[in-house]
Amino acid sequence: MSTASARADGVRVLITGGTSGLGAAMAAALLDAAAMVAVTGRDAARAGAAARNLGRGAIGIGMDVRDEHEVERGVDRACEELGGLDVLVNNAGIGMRAVSPRFITEPQPFWTVPPEGFRDVVATNLSGYFLLARAVVPRMLAAGAGRVVNISMNHATMNRKGFVPYGPARAGAEALSRIMAADLAGSPVTVNLLLPGGATLTGMIPEDLPGQMRSRLLPASVMAEPIRWLCSPAAAGVHDQRIVASEFASWLTERAGHGRA
């Protein structure tokens, strides 16, 4: 199957943090593939506006992924509006700008990071993944099918100077994802990791980033083909994979060569 032709007709997808950046790009790609999509954001009005901007029946849900009660209410609404859930895309996150506006040009040592900033990033980027999967996976198991896609990032960035708390939070989310996959092995629910493959041009990037560095950023649309494929019939049974979006075409070709198209 050509990645560009991957369809997700009627697949019901919940994308956290879908109001902008990677989340919005993935939502648009899935709507193009005929999926049914709900996007979340902390601010209900912004989530609603993002859904209206996406069009094609997208649904916006206000949800703070740090709060298990809001998560349960948001998942309930998504299931009600979409008639159930087939795919959870754990994407909600906040970046280094939350603790250091010039984190690229002026790396901030970990001992100067404010504790409240550290806790907020970890609560969003790590605990949020856990809370969403905790709310959604039992429903998928009861339904007899489901997929979880956890958005990650390059390992090098997880260990990069000045990247506390973003690096540790994303490293934790990746470890969580692999454990989720192990726990769900042999079940009808699959878990996979998807990452862009480099820094992307999103709201997490400082506005004063030098032009030369900005020109090397990946577009958020790099996520379009792999997320369409992961939500399509072609990805049935694909489990515990770490897929790099910028290398997706070669990954898919290699997979096909091993008889796992």
Image: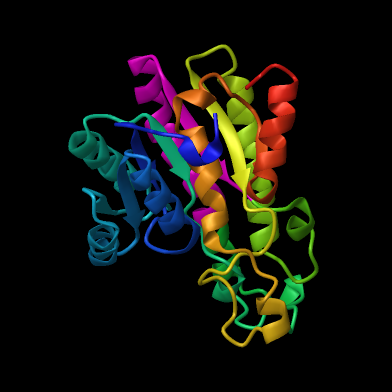
**Magenta residues, start to end:** 123-152
Nearest the camera: 57 or 66? 57
The secondary structure that dominates the magenta segment is helix
Q: Is residue 124 magenta?
A: yes
Q: From the image, which quarter does the N terminus lie in?
A: top right
Which residue does the image show at 45% across and 56% down from the upper left? 25
Which quadrant holds residue 118? bottom right
Percent of width and height locating residue 90: 48, 45
| Along the line of sight, the residue nearer the viewer: 120 or 217 | 217
Is residue 35 a member of the stretch shown in magenta?
no
Q: Is residue 57 visible?
A: yes
* Rendering coords of residue 184 (x, y %): 55, 20
Relative depth, front residue between 52 and 253: 253
Q: How many marks?
A: 0
- Name which residue lies at 47% across and 63% down: 21
**What colour-coding does the image apply?**
rainbow
**Quadrant hosting residue 206:** bottom right
| Residue at x 42% of width, y 40% of height | 132
Residue 131 seen in the figure: no
Seen in the picture, residue 230 relative to 247 is either above or below; the reply is above
Residue at horizontal 53 percent and vertical 60 percent from the top: 220
From the top left corner, tell me how far across and down residue 170 is, in percent: 64, 52
Identify the image quadrant of residue 102: bottom right
Image quarter (top left, top right, bottom left or bottom right) of the C terminus: top right
